Image (cartoon, rainbow, N blue to C red):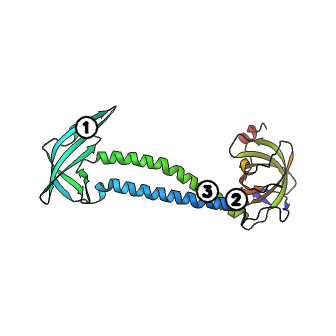
Amino acid sequence: MQLTKDLRIPSTLAPAGEVPAWQSAAVRKGRLKGAIISSAVFIVLAATAVVVLALFTHPMWGNYPQVGATVAGRVEFHGGKSTICRVDLQFNLDGTPHTASVTDDDPCSFLPHPGAQVMLAYDPKNLSGVLIEGHDSGIRAATALIVINIAIVLLPALAIMVAFVRSYRHARKAAGKKPWREVTAVVKGLNADTEPTSLLLQVPDANGTDRECLLRYRAQDLPEFAPKPGSPVTLWPVADGEGHAIVTTPGCGAVTDATISTPNGFELRTFGL
């Protein structure tokens, strides 16, 4: 069977009826469920982020109507190294007087002084959402903070979604149409301190030459599998030929995703070789 692009090893068909069927295997159901849920969560979070940003930045791009206003006063607040200025405004709409306040991260000396006439962009649906034309640093600073917080939430959600989707696609590609194979290898090293667990195997290639390959798998998925360095092991893998596989072992009803690669010098040194 083809494990990677440059490693093909002898194998036999695994015993019929003793290995999980792909369509009913827990790896398919679990990975598919994880892919669907993680994708749905990411889409909901991303849509929410877009809506929040659109609503918050709307005064800058929403073509709000404008009205003349008078600066009634301004108050500067100091907190640590930051300074915030609140500007109070008065304006009339259809003969009705209104008041509003704008908060800006600039010092008050940067903003219109009391008695100054300014142009005010306002949201007709919510008069508390106003913007002094030419003074939008407050919205920009708050928007940057919102973007940072959105990134903190969205990037991990994206990473989780990609991991689940790739996991399902690799498992489907490996097991969807291929039969389980049985291979025998010798354990040359085991590193259980990493996640996933790294298992260094010695296997004969198609020419009978002993080769080394590195199998990374989730040990918690195969609790009955306890390989020991120097001992032979029997594995039932299904591989896509490009380094991705799902693996189970005789007597273990569970399966796990795995990756197979040729170890480099650094990886061999971690096994003391």
Distance (Cα) linking label 1 and label 3: 48 Å
Lateral position of residue 246 relative to residue 103, left or right: right
Q: Residue at x 53, y 54 (%)?
A: 158
The answer to whether the residues at label 2 and label 3 have Cβ atoms under 8 Å apart is: no
The vertical placement of 151 against 240, above or below, is: above
- At label 1, which amino acid type do we have? Pro
Lateral position of residue 11 relative to residue 114, left or right: right
Residue 11 x %, y %: 84, 59
Query: If the image is split into quadrants, where does the C terminus sit?
Result: top right
Mark 1, mark 2: which one is toward the viewer?
Answer: 2
Numbered badge on residue 164: 3
Under circle 3, the secondary element is helix
> Quadrant of the rendered structure where residue 243 is?
bottom right
Q: Earlier in the sequence, mark 2 or mark 3?
A: 2
| Residue placed furthest toward the top | 80
Residue 68 or 95: which is nearer the viewer?
95
Q: Residue at x 28, y 55 (%)?
A: 59
Numbered badge on residue 107: 1
Residue 90 x %, y %: 16, 49
Residue 215 or 150: which is nearer the viewer?
150
| Residue placed furthest toward the bottom | 177
Residue 8 x %, y %: 80, 58
- At label 3, which amino acid type do we have? Phe
- At label 2, which amino acid type do we have? Val
Numbered badge on residue 193: none
Residue 109 x %, y %: 21, 37
* Label 2 sits on residue: 27
Q: Earlier in the sequence, mark 1 or mark 3?
A: 1
